[in-house]
Amino acid sequence: MKPYTLVFVFSIIGYFGVSYCSDCTAEKSLICRKQTNCLDCIRAHSCCNWCYKAGSSSINACDIKNELSNCEYVEENQAVAIISNVTLNKQISPQSYKVILRKDETVKLTVTYQADRDYPLELYYLTDLSYSMRDYVETLKSLGDKLRTSLSSLTKNYKLAYGSFLDKPGMPFTLTSPDNFENPCNTDKLKCNPTYLFKHTLNFTSNTDEFFKAVTDSQISANLDDLDGALEAIQQVLLCDETLGWTEESRKLIVLSTDSLLHSAGDGILVGATRVNPGKCLIDRFGEHIDPLTYDYPSIAEIRSLLRKYKVNLIVAVQEKEHFYQSLKNSTLQKEMYVGRLKNASDILQLVTDGFQQFIRQVEFSTDTSDIPELDVKFFSDCNQGSVTETTFCQNIDPYQKIDFNVELTLKEWVSDSRYRRIIIREKNINEELTIDINFPDKCNCINLDAALKNVTCNNGILSCGKCICNKGWKGDRCSEECLDSLDGCIERGASNFCSGKGNCVCGKCECNEPYVGTYCEYECPTDGNGRICSDHGTCNDGTCTCNSDYSGHECSCHKSTDRCKFGSDIICQGNGECECNKCNCDAGYSGTYCERVNKTNIFCDDIEDSVLSTSDNAIMPTIVSSNNVTLKLISNNTEECRQSCVYLKYVNTKKCYVEYCYEKGTDNNIIINTQPKNNMKCSITTQAMSSYLGIALFSTIVAAGIAYIFWKKWRIYKLDQAEYKKYEEMQLIERQEENPLYNSPYRKYSVPK
């Protein structure tokens, strides 16, 4: 596939029919119910939907989908992210998004960057042709195949261009006497070309032979001071992009080789060049600068701005004064420049490779929101380091590895008009971008209501999805009731906000947002955890709840009944606590739903143990009802309840057996016990029996070990005696052999006859 082939793939991300109901909680429902017309409804939150009920005057026609019923028509809301457009053979994907934004509702998108191994590379060699650089130029002419090999290792698609520079041809930078102007090397009795500011020699080409021919044809020149016009040469290389042949989709590098310092803005006044270049390309058809003595040198800030604008990076190969360029990089051109020491001309190949690697190992995104200042854009990434932070820039990443950035869009305020807007996210080093088209909920279609509402007329207002939106000074279902169009009745004396900032002024009266009430919405009604005023168990008057007869408490959430505090009897909380809001508040040392636990003991277990035993002795599984208001149910397997209930301990011979059972509250305050039959009883050897077995085993082991030790000791003594006797016999034999043959021993041996 060719590198410029574009393949478009459209992916639907939550388009109109997206499922977001699982996130539409009771809190979102409260937001929706505050809206009084269709447009405000769909703008409030993506969970909000507008319900039209014919003949209904209720303003609570906005709610989450699951709460709507009996609707003749529902204006279903749109989801957030709509469409992403993924283009292949790009280093940034996707290339576009379409989203719907609402105020204070954050939309999260993802953009991925991955460097392409064969992405086009355009390399402009900009060489200082002053006399001190003559050895470098001669070596550069001989690189040939080495340069081709070096560039091919970076990418298969590369182009080269060539240009050179010196300085402005005027005093005090150049001698202007006729002889010295024509031959600046005259003082050294050498021949070289006249001084010039900048000369472009070769447009971008993939033919390296043409490049080396241009280098070979270059001629050395000279200037007076130790500073040169490199900045103005770089400026022209950038401004003359069309003339030089820069292309849109490529990674662009300028390789600057020099051994001098830089003239910058203000230095041009010494030669009479005082005007600021307004951004014009100043080279003629021969590639030479046409007006070097009119325009001043550019500043470092101008060069940085142009490098960013044209997405070009700068590699500086410097023979001397490396510290100056390194300081320039650290202070101003941190992300745009790479500096390397040029000890000899052949080093240029390695410097180009190192600089190229540095630039593909960094990625930076930016965007301009000046057209929509109400929008807040944030970038987040872990830069493949594991920790996600808010950042637009990653560096020292692995080459050709994917890097994901999460983009968060938040609308801080509603925009002044509802036309669609576009923002563009750009990458610093390559000319690729992500476009985000933003739409805002600005109207309700209500197309299914046309026939039903043909005869509905809003006398002094407009019809919006079955509801009349009245003009100022009018109210009513059909906007036919004239009212006082004044704000005086909506602001309290001494206050700064209408309706205390908690409602809208309609016909001179405040219509308060929930949960606020009062003439000026100055009172806040108590709500429960679900946002219900007075828990839906009372009415609110001036910010105070008047509860129904069965409820009490600040927000009427406390039920006066004691049913949930009794279990198996009429005793409240088993006499170990108090019933508050139909829930046991246990005394110190007691716990449980009914205060039935003291420390680790459950008093219910002791009370119902006899009933459990009578049931567990039966192998059949009937339901048995005892006379003490206890119902027992046999179960064959453990249930979830029984894993956290009572355990009856029973000893059978040397085994310890368990019967598990659990209890629950039934109708009429009776007790239901779930237990197991006898044949499902779990048994294990008791601790006492286990201790006895272990004692016998330990004693037997000790006795056996003692006997074995005695036998081993006797055997060892026997073996030592045998060895000692053998040694004695050997010594006797040696003594006999050493005796004098003339010696007659006095010892005699006689044997008694048998």
Image (cartoon, helix red, strand yellow):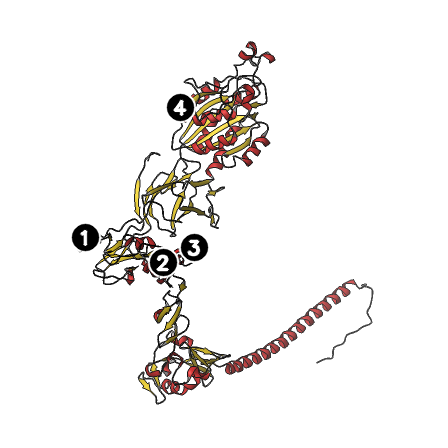
Give the side of residue 470 with respect to residue 257, left or right: left
Q: CA distance from mark 1 to mark 4?
A: 61 Å
First reached walking from the N terminus: tag 4 or tag 3: 4
Q: CA distance from mark 3 to mark 2?
A: 13 Å
Q: Position of residue 170 (x, y in %)?
A: 54, 16
Q: Amino acid at mark 2?
A: Gly
Question: How many residues crowd around disc 3 within 10 Å: few (fewer than 14), some, or many (20 or more)?
Answer: few
Q: In this rendering, does residue 111 appear at all? A: yes
Q: CA distance from mark 1 to mark 3?
A: 43 Å
Q: Mark 1 vs mark 4: give the one in front.
A: 1
Q: CA distance from mark 2 to mark 4?
A: 71 Å
**Residue 721 position by quadrant:** bottom right
Q: Position of residue 219 (x, y in %)?
A: 51, 17
Q: Which mark is residue 496?
A: 3
| Residue at mark 4 | 243
Q: Is residue 645 above or below residue 295?
A: below
| Observer-nearest of 151 and 606 | 606
> SS class of the residue under badge 2?
helix
Q: How many marks?
A: 4
Q: CA distance from mark 4 to mark 3?
A: 64 Å
| Residue at mark 1 | 450
Q: Amino acid at mark 3?
A: Ser
Q: Is residue 592 above or below residue 227?
A: below
Q: Mark 2 vs mark 4: give the one in front.
A: 2
| Residue at mark 2 | 489
Q: Mark 1 vs mark 3: give the one in front.
A: 3
First reached walking from the N terminus: tag 1 or tag 3: 1
